[in-house]
Structure formats: structure tokens, C-alpha cells
Image (cartoon, rainbow, N blue to C red):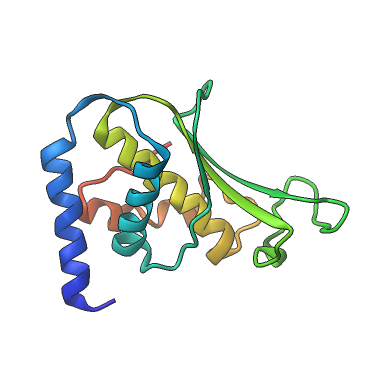
């Protein structure tokens, strides 16, 4: 992406945060999540992430989740690890699920970006645990440039 295009998308994110960031009781749609996935993918991840399936549903104890699903009969990997050597296989699917309601619009964007970091860990970094480790927190400086928080 050119420097000009990157500046444009950074500005888009910052302006959206100023305009909508404090909007209360935000209820996202799948289409909105997909649209902002594309914006954040350009801004934060240099368009390296592939669009996973997206879902909006009731989640207990979580604001969002990024999951990897595979057929263990076809793809073998160590217990409690992801099949990172097979992320390009058609037998491995990725999904991001977001809750139905966020306290603010900014919470929605930060949660989506948070789950995108996990997707990056799985598909690009090929981190077999893809949890809140050093690989995850290395994104904090980049998030800060966009006035986004990266936390648990």
C-alpha cells in the first residue's frame, strides 16, 4: 500500500473514532463488521489477512472470539495447539464472532481489531497457541498510533 493510501485509511479510522467512538449501546451487523475488517486490515495489517467467516451472537464472558476449526481426522497437530502448518488448507476454517451489543462503538472496533491480531497470529505468525503472549502484545505500538487500545 502506498504511503498516501495508508495516510488516508489512518485518517478514516481516526475520524471515525472521533465521530462515533463514544456512541453508546452499539449493535453491530455482520456487514458492518466485514466492512471495518477491510478498513482495519488496510490500516493495521497491510492487507495481509483473509476475510474469515463473521458472526454476531450472544457471547457469555467474551466480547469477541477468533476461532480455528479443522477436521482432526484429516489434520493432526499436538494437543492444545493450532494446525499452523495447515492454515492454507481448505480443511482449516477461521471465524471471528462478536457480541451483539457493545457499550460504545469504540469497544466494537477495538474488539474486532483484537480478534484480527489473533487471526494474524494464527495465519501469518503461525503461532501454535495464538494467545495473549509477546506475539500478541507486539501490536500495541501500532494500535496506539490509531488511538486504539489492545488489551485482554
> Residue at (25%, 36%) from the top-left corner?
106
User: Outermost residue, front direction?
Assistant: 31
Count of number-bearing discs: 0
Quadrant in the rendering for residue 123: bottom right
Residue drawn at (65%, 67%) of the image? 88
User: Does 30 sit left or right of 146 as displayed?
Assistant: right
> Is residue 126 shown above or below 22?
below
Residue 69 appears left or right of 98: right
Percent across and percent down for residue 139 are 37, 56
Name the spot of residue 58 as percent of width and height, x first.
50, 23
Decide which of 76, 149 is in the foreground and name it: 76
Q: Position of residue 29 (x, y in %)?
A: 38, 35
Residue found at x 47% / y 63%: 49
Between 10 and 130, the residue placed more toward the observer is 10
> In the rendered image, which quarter contains the N terminus?
bottom left
62 sits left or right of 4 in the view: right
Answer with the quarter of the image where residue 67 lies: top right
Q: In the image, what residue occupies the spot 29% across and 52% down?
A: 143
Vertical side of 101 occupied by 82: above or below = below
Question: Relative to residue 1, is residue 127 drawn left or right?
Answer: right
Quarter occupied by the C terminus: top left
Amino acid at each position: 500500500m502506498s504511503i498516501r493510501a495508508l495516510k488516508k485509511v489512518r485518517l478514516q479510522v481516526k475520524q471515525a473514532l472521533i465521530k462515533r467512538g463514544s456512541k453508546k449501546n452499539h449493535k453491530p451487523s455482520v456487514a458492518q463488521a466485514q466492512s471495518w475488517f477491510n478498513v482495519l486490515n488496510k490500516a493495521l495489517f497491510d492487507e495481509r489477512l483473509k476475510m474469515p467467516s463473521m458472526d454476531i451472537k450472544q457471547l457469555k464472558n467474551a466480547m469477541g472470539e477468533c476461532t480455528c476449526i479443522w477436521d482432526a481426522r484429516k489434520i493432526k497437530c499436538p494437543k492444545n495447539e493450532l494446525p499452523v502448518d495447515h492454515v492454507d488448507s481448505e480443511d482449516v476454517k477461521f471465524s471471528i464472532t462478536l457480541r451483539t451489543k457493545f457499550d460504545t462503538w469504540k469497544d466494537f472496533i477495538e474488539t474486532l481489531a483484537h480478534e484480527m491480531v489473533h487471526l494474524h497470529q494464527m495465519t501469518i505468525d503461525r503461532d501454535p497457541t495464538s494467545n495473549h503472549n509477546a506475539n500478541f502484545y507486539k501490536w500495541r505500538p501500532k494500535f496506539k498510533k490509531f488511538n486504539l487500545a489492545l488489551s485482554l
